[in-house]
Image (spheres, rainbow, N blue to C red):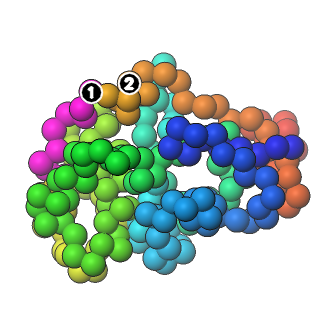
Amino acid sequence: MALHLVVNGRTLPADGFPAQTTLLDFLRAQGLTGAKEGCAEGECGACTVVMLRPDGAGSKYVPVNSCLLFLPMCAGQEIWTVEALANGAALAPAQQAMVDTAGSQCGYCTPGFVMSLFAEQYRRGACDPHALSGNLCRCTGYRPIADAAASLGEAPAGPFRDRMAAPAPGFSPVECDGFSRPVTLTECF
């Protein structure tokens, strides 16, 4: 079965990678090096990317730890990384907020925080700094990062907001060497 996923709006083949390859390692092999491996246990958030998930008739951006997801788990899914936010243009609001509040020192955790801030800004409702509790910072401290979250307003109009009006990709069964993703209990048994 051919595996693929959509990363930053582009469909990428995922065949040829061992089933236990993490989403993080796959992304980094594609040259998308913003997400980092900090703890490899899903506790620091340096590897945070967002996945499009269903939200009523539309979709929402959900932060996920790319170090914990095996590549076949993400087959057919839509993933966005920090590299897609500015895409060579002006910084995205979440990125600019981190700059404006001095929310970064060494920068290792910054892409993960930015992606969590991005997902939170695009969540319907006010931005909640507690939504960043899955990200750790050892240099800057949390006040400037919480200030960055508090400074974010409504998600700006544009392709990221427009994308939320369309449904997220669904899950289909995946079978590959060393991995099985059934989508029903019957398929599982």
**Region of the chain picked out in magenta, as a range:** 149-157
Q: Does residue 56 show up magenta in the picture? A: no
Q: Are marks 2 and 1 in contact (CB under 8 Å)?
A: yes
Chain-order first, disc 2 or disc 1: 1
Q: What residue appears at the point 24 percent right and 45 percent down from the top-left corner?
A: 90
Examine the rendering and report whether any part of residue 56 can be seen: no
Position of residue 168 relative to residue 173, above or below, is: above
Position of residue 27 relative to residue 38, above or below, is: above
Q: What residue appears at the point 48 percent right and 78 percent down from the top-left corner?
A: 39
Q: What residue appears at the point 68 percent right and 56 percent down from the top-left corner?
A: 71
- Could you say whether the residue bearing mark 2 is in a helix, strand or loop? helix
Q: Is residue 80 left or right of residue 77?
A: left
Quarter of the image for residue 141 reads bottom left
Label number found at residue 162: 2
Comparing 40 with 27, the one in front is 27
Q: Report x, y in % for residue 163.
A: 43, 27
Q: Is residue 34 left or right of residue 171?
A: left
Q: Report x, y in % for residue 89.
A: 29, 44
Categorize mark 1 by other alpha carbons within 10 Å: few (<14), some (14-19), many (20+): few
Q: Report x, y in % for residue 110.
A: 31, 66
Q: Is residue 182 left or right of residue 116?
A: right
Q: How many marks?
A: 2
Amino acid type, mark 1:
Ala
Label number found at residue 73: none
Examine the rendering and report whether any part of residue 33 can be seen: yes
Label number found at residue 157: 1
Q: Report x, y in % for residue 8.
A: 50, 43
